[in-house]
Image (tube, rainbow, N blue to C red):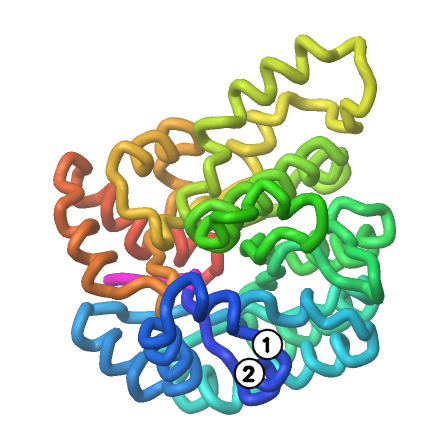
Amino acid sequence: MIIALEEHVSTPRHNALWDSSGEAGRNGEAYMKDVEAKLIRPDIRLADMAKFGVDHMILSLTSPGAQAIADTGLAVEFAHETNDFLVENYTKPYPDKFTAFATVAMQDPKKAADELDRAVTKLGMKGAMINGFSNIGDKVAYLDEPQNMVFWDKVNELNVPVYLHPREPMFGAGRRIYDGFPSLIGSAWGFAVETATHALRLMMSGLFDRYPNLTIILGHLGEGVTFLLPRAQHRLYMQRNGTGLGANKQPLTEYFRRNFYLTTSGHWHTPALDNAIAEVGIERVMFSIDYPYEYMEYAFGWWNTVNHLYPHQKDMMSYGNAKRLFRM
C-alpha cells in the first residue's frame, strides 16, 4: 500500500492568479505544459496512480497558493473557494483515492484559523499546507510571528499537522546571490534554503514550548535540515552570550525529533534517506512523490531499490506512519 502526501493540484482561479513564467523558464515549456495538465486533470492523476500502485493521495494546492496574494480579503476568499473546489472535484467524487490539506490565508490569521476549523471539521481535510511566508501588501510575514498565535491555537486544538512547503525566496537583495544562475531559485536550491530557514525560525521562536504537541511536516527529506541542524545548534550554543538567540527552551534538535515529520518527496537519494531516519527516527519519515513536478517513474525507480530496510520498515514509510499521523 502507498499513501503519498506532497501531491499537488491547481484550480482555475489559481491558474488565473499564478504567474508560472519563472517555473517555465527554469524547467522548459514542455515540462510545464505536462505539469499544468496533470495539476488540473484528475483522470491523468488516477491513471498514473493505478499504473504505479499509489493507493491514496493527500492533495494540496500547488505553491505559491494563497500565500502569494497580497490583498488580504482576496486571499481569504481564495482559500475558502479552493477548499470547496478540492472537495467537489476530488475528495467527494473519489473518497477512496483522495483527501486533502486545507489552503489557509495567513494574511489574516484569525480567518485562517476559522477556515482551518471549517476545513477539518466540516470538509474532512487532514491539516493545512502553507507555502512559506505570506505577502501582505508590500510586506511579508513568517509563521513564527506573534500575530499568528491565534492560528496556532486552532492547530493545537484540532491536533492536525501543518505541512510547511517551499516557495521562491523574496525579490530584492535576498535574490542577488542567484543573479546569473536563475535555475537555482526554485526547487533545485532556493526552495530548500528558504524553507529550512523558516523551520529554524519556528524552532527558535518558542512555538514548540508553547504548543509541545504541534506537528510540522517538511518535504524533500527535510529541506537540508537533517544535515545542517546539528552544526546550527552547536554554533548557537557557542553564541549563547550574543544576541538574537530566540526564545526556545530546548535544543533545536529536540524539537526536530519531537515535532517534525519528513517526506521523501522529490529527493531520490538513499544516503539522504538514511540520514533523515537517523535524525528523526523511521516512524517520522513518509514516502511521497511531489507529483506532478516529479515523475512517478523516478520516485518508484528509486524506492524499489531501497532494499537495505526490513519490509515492515518500508511499510511504515509507505503507509503506516501516514495512517497513524492522519488517523486514517
Q: Which secondary structure type mostly characterizes the magenta part of the structure?
A: strand
Look at the image and give the residue range highlighted in magenta. Answer: 1-6
The answer to whether residue 218 shows anywhere in this view is no
Q: Is residue 244 left or right of residue 301?
A: right
Question: Residue tagged by mark 2?
Answer: 15
Query: Hey, what amino acid is under mark 2?
Result: Asn
Image quadrant in which the C terminus is located: bottom left
Q: Residue at x 80, y 9 (%)?
A: 241
Q: Residues within 10 Å of mark 2 (few under 14, many from 20)?
A: some
The image shows residue 130 at horizontal and vertical percentages of 62, 60
Reply above or below: 72 against 217: below
Q: Residues at badges 2 and 1 in contact (C-beta under 8 Å)?
A: yes
Query: Hey, what amino acid is under mark 1?
Result: Trp
Say the numbered circle drawn on residue 34: none
Q: Residue at x 76, y 34 (%)?
A: 206
Q: Quadrant of residue 271?
A: top left
